[in-house]
Amino acid sequence: MQNFLVIVLKIISTVLLADFVAGFVHWVEDAYAREDTPILGPLVARANIVHHHYPRYFTRLSWWQSSWDLLMLSALLVLGAWSLGTLTWPVWLFAVIATNANEIHKWEHRTRKENGPAISFLQDIHVLQSARHHAIHHTNPKNVHYCTTTNVLNPILDGLHFWDGLEWLLAHTLGIHRRPDTSVPGHGPVPAWLEEYRRPMTTAKHDCVSCIHATQGKCPRARQNASTLPNSPTSSPA
């Protein structure tokens, strides 16, 4: 019985560690990755800017498009642990969760019908983060709830003002300040290049790709638009 409890605790701690690491990377990307950042700009910053303006665009991406970079990093972790003789099952579990962090994040932007009964059930019982929980991150000013795997860590980290504290520390020690989020009103002009992401997925009356209700599966226009727009993000991801 004691061994069973130890295994359960290891599983829980590994999942939460992977959630925290993914949340930390998410925070760095949201707060400090800029369009003109070498290498990371086109690979990371643009995708994050698009996601904050049009959250549902993310659901059109395949697993490979969403997760190739995380797969590479996880492979390096596994190889490093193997070379050091520390490749244990918790390392494998961490690598699997970390590799799929973006895919789990994507599920929070899909409707229950798109996710299917299994994923929806795991979200309902809070094994996976729910769309309602993640929607708080997409509520202005969009600077909280960075962890996207579970519902556990965000209330704790936000309650401690963890991310605010890190940003204050960076600003006052290194002079590094948070990037303005142009998806938040009053935070600067919207980049002109974003239009290419909006145009194929909008109607004259409604834009489901940026609708927070569509994120939660409650958009009254989402089903209608899905039937009239071949490229609508409410259809299954590519």
Image (spheres, helix red, strand yellow):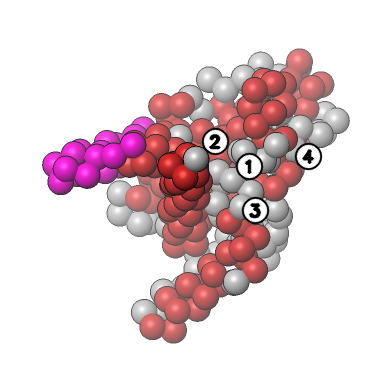
Disc 2 element: helix
User: Which quadrant holds residue 38?
Assistant: bottom left
Task: Tell me if I can see residue 220 in this picture.
Answer: yes
Q: Tags 2 and 1 in contact by the CB under 8 Å rule?
A: yes
**Magenta segment boundaries in residue numbering:** 68-89
The reply to whether callout 4 and callout 1 are in contact (CB within 8 Å) is no
Q: Amino acid at mark 1?
A: Gln
Q: Residues within 10 Å of mark 4 (few under 14, many from 20)?
A: some
Q: Which mark is residue 104?
A: 2
Q: Residue at x 44, y 84 (%)?
A: 172
The three-letter amino acid code for the residue at tag 4 is: His
Whole-angstrom CA distance, mark 4 to mark 1, is: 17 Å
In this picture, residue 69 sits left or right of residue 161: left
User: Which residue in the protein does label 1 denote?
Assistant: 129
Residue 140: % across, % down: 70, 59
Residue 147 position within the rendered picture, expressed as x and y whole percent measured from the top left: 55, 52
Mark 1 or 3: in front is 1
Instruction: Identify the image quadrant of residue 79.
Output: top left
Q: Tell me the chief SS of the magenta region.
A: helix
Seen from the viewer's position, the closer of residues 101 and 38 is 101
Closest to the camera, between mark 2 and mark 3, is 2
Q: Which residue is mark 3?
A: 137
Mark 1 Cα shell of 10 Å, populated few (<14), some (14-19), many (≥20): many
Going from the N terminus, do you reach mark 4 or mark 1 first? 1
Element type where label 1 sits in the image: loop
Q: Nearer the viewer, residue 100 or 140?
A: 100
**Cα distance in 3D space between marks 2 and 3:** 15 Å
Q: Residues within 10 Å of mark 2 (few under 14, many from 20)?
A: some
Q: Earlier in the sequence, mark 4 or mark 3?
A: 3
